[in-house]
């Protein structure tokens, strides 16, 4: 059976810590914000999607700085993992900090944390 090239690439990259990818991207953006134009952010997101901490670091790095009105990338929205993590990160309540810690450590899903924080309704 032939090996799927995407799966082979993904598996080899999974050996590299996704957090290192997110940190390197964060450092690059801080040094040269214009570099965002040349990056395939969807590919980078797919590379770190299984590591919630790396995904949160990536979102934080890509978050629009307060002095910029538009960075070229919309804020995460809807029921995405990034939207829940960003909302938990921005919420000053101790409950939100605790829930974010549970999501990042893998104890809880981002969806369950959003429900517990009151951001989403429990599906009926």
Image (tube, rainbow, N blue to C red):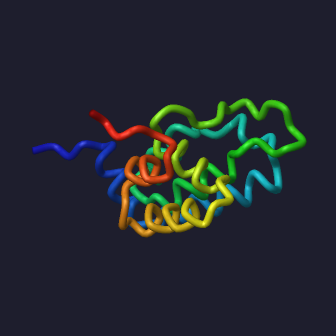
Q: Write the residue at 69% across / 52% down.
A: 61
Q: Write the residue at 38% across / 51% down.
A: 112
118 up-or-down from 22: above or below: above
19 up-or-down from 83: above or below: below
Q: Residue furthest left?
A: 1
Q: Quadrant of residue 63?
A: top right
Q: Is residue 10 left or right of residue 97?
A: left
Percent coordinates x, y for residue 4 in the rendering: 24, 42
Q: Write the residue at 56% across / 59% down.
A: 96
Percent coordinates x, y for residue 35 in the rendering: 75, 43
Q: Nearer the viewer, residue 103 or 49?
A: 103
Percent coordinates x, y for residue 114 in the rendering: 46, 48
Q: Quadrant of residue 102?
A: bottom left
Q: Is residue 68 left or right of residue 82?
A: right
Percent coordinates x, y for residue 113 in the rendering: 44, 54
Where the C terminus falls, by quadrant?
A: top left
Q: Is residue 69 left or right of residue 94?
A: right
Q: Nearer the viewer, residue 37 or 112?
A: 112
Q: Quadrant of residue 26?
A: bottom right
Q: Residue furthest right?
A: 67
Where the N terminus falls, by quadrant?
A: top left
């Amino acid at each position: 059976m032939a090996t799927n090239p995407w799966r082979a690439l993904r598996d080899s990259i999974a050996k590299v810590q996704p957090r290192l990818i997110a940190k390197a991207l964060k450092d690059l953006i801080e040094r040269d914000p214009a570099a965002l134009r040349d990056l395939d952010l969807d590919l980078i997101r797919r590379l770190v999607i299984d590591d919630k901490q790396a995904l949160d670091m990536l979102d934080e790095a890509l978050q629009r700085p307060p002095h910029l009105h538009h960075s070229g990338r919309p804020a995460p929205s809807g029921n995405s993992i990034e939207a829940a993590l960003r909302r938990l990160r921005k919420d000053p309540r101790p409950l939100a900090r605790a829930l974010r810690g549970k999501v990042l450590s893998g104890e809880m899903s981002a969806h369950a944390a959003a429900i517990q924080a009151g951001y989403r309704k429990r599906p009926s």
